[in-house]
Amino acid sequence: MTTETVTGLVAVVLVTLTTLLIGTWGLRVSRTTSDFFVASRSVRPALNASAIGGEYLSAASFLGVAGLVLTFGADMLWYPIGWTAGYLLLLVLVAAPLRRSGAYTLPDFAEARLGSRRVRATCSVMVVAIGWLYLLPQFHGAGITIRAAIGAPTWVGPVIIGAVVLANVTSGGMRSITFVQAFQYWLKLTALLLPLVVLLIVWAGDGAPGSRMARDDSWSVPLASGGSEGLYLTYSLIIATFLGTMGLPHVVVRFYTNPDGRAARRTTLVVLVLLGIFYVLPPVYGALGRVYAVELAASGRSDVLVLELPRLMVPGIGGELLAGLVTAGAFAAFLSTSSGLAIAVAGVISQDVTGKAFGHRRLSGITAFRVAAVIAVVVPLAVALAVPSVGVARAVGLAFAVAASTFCPLLLLGIWWRGLTDVGAVTGMLAGGLGSGAGVMWTLLDGSATGWPAVLLEQPAAWSVPLAFVVMIGVSKATASRVPAHTRRFMVRLHTPEVLDLDRG
Amino acid sequence: MTGPPRRHTPRARTGDIDDQTRLGTVYLESLLREQLRLAARTILVLVLSVGTLPLAFHLVPGLAGLQLLGIPLAWLLLGGAVYPLLVLLGWRYVRRAERNERDFADLLGEIEQ
């Protein structure tokens, strides 16, 4: 066994053990079904914000961004900006009302707001679809990380991640996950920051050499190439990421763990700070990669840039230790995001499928959740093992486009517009979901053509989001008689501060 | 005047919201409008600052060649300056949204005479 393998193995084992340990510790304080789903809504803003940051910074953030920047240049900086700005939009439009709605999950919110089982069912399907779409790149990322770290076949990583996530989620649920993820934010930040400081010192010591890439002129242009098509792609990506964050199932479920609406806002503000600090780092790896790791971009393996760069720049044991640290951070990234997604998807499946009575039998709340967690993890795991990987950050980008085209209009109109009806919500989500879904399918299956139709499908958000809004508003207006009778009371609940003693329905 | 002077019984305005009186509706509408306006202003600043960057670089290709302290302008803006701006916008929003809610609570907490 080489030193290379040993440091990688130690890193992965340490992260896995710590995660399981903190998870078990959480188990002892996690007793009720409410603990399982939302940590009984008693998590303080600072802890909760670290947990949200830890959960949110996925394989795409940790590995994907640096790789994309290395290959494509400054236009890829829009990914981390969008993932952060998405939280600003979440803060100003959704955070406090969503917490005050008192619902556990997105389908809960939709049902409470519109009083319709049909809307609930549509939302449940969308949550599972987006959750699985987002889990796929996490599993793929785990595969390439394990291969880069210890040279194991690519199926090993996904299987380890799947097993650890299942162990954690089924044993402790949300409460233990809160501690695990708060820890993992700080681990991820350290794992990127510390090696980067060393690498920058090495770079300065080498006389701060410039890029060794052949084609360098377009690298500082924050636009996709191709004139107006590039401008469209960039703006469409901005729309998808800015508006998609609020519709991601694992992001939304976190807001119910705040004690009240005011805390939900303050938590989100702290998240903005934590994300802003983190996202400055990956692009610098990308920039250094253009000096020291040109061959990774040429061979199409840019996703492993963050993992390989310490070894390429620092010879000997120092480089190995740094590589081990980065590997630990990457593994933490898959674990935390996958756990959050698994909880969100399992929550919906347990409420709408496994928690239902089959004949005379009915599973208890916690058993139903555990069965649901198995389904939530095993299905995307099987798909990840079966289909080849598309780029990590791109696959995540597609999940954002679908979320922006379905849950974003539902949340915004549900929170701010009294005229929304159940029929309008369902048709709007279907229109946006089918539109963006067609783009996803096209990218996953083909994605080779060029020209405007291909461009429109590659980044569907710029037309599928407005389409969803227009359909949702138009159909709601046409079915205005179906506006639920309790709408006004529900608005009181969403928007008035909790200190007031009001009838909230 | 024949009868005894009529006396208003003290009544908190929260009752107006609960009973969905016209006054209660006006209060709620004003809170919603204030919060939505605040959100819209924040988003407008975001769109005008960050949102116009791609268009600016599209219309003025020369911007891509500009450097500050040896770092390309696009990198300084997109890789660094954007994040403090987002935090600042969020911080301003939270302060003002909480102030709107305090005003609303004060308004409803007053006892009508």
Image (spheres, coloured by chain):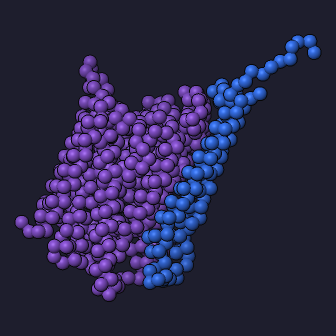
Residue A365 lies, with reference to residue B66, above or below; the image says: above
Q: Which residue is drawn at 42% across and 50% down?
A: A46
Q: Is residue B109 visible to the viewer in this orientation of the structure?
A: yes
Q: Nearer the viewer, residue A375 or B28?
A: B28
Outermost residue, top side = B2
**Residue at the (59%, 61%) spot, across then down:** B45
Residue A23: where, in percent of width, then height? Answer: 25, 43
| Colour blue maps to chain | B
Q: Quadrant of residue A249?
A: top left
Task: Look at 16% across and 55% down and name the residue there.
Answer: A13
Q: Which residue is the extreme one toward the left?
A: A1
Q: Residue furthest right?
A: B1
Residue ID at (54%, 60%): B88
- Which quadrant would the C terminus of chain A be assigned to in this image? top right
Q: In this view, does A492 lie above or below A191?
A: above
**Image location of residue A112, percent across then percent down:** 48, 32
What percent of the width, then of the height, locates residue A218?
Answer: 42, 79
Closer-to-camera residue (B50/A300): B50
Image label count:
0
Q: Where is residue A333 in the image (x, y as percent from the top left)?
A: 29, 56
**Residue A243 vs residue B22: left or right?**
left
Chain in purple, by letter, is A
Q: In this view, does A199 lie to the left or right of A86?
A: left
Q: Is residue A226 visible?
A: no
Q: Which of A285 and A384 is in front in this view?
A: A285
The quarter of the picture where the N terminus of chain A appears is bottom left
- Relative to residue A202, is residue A499 depicted above or below? above
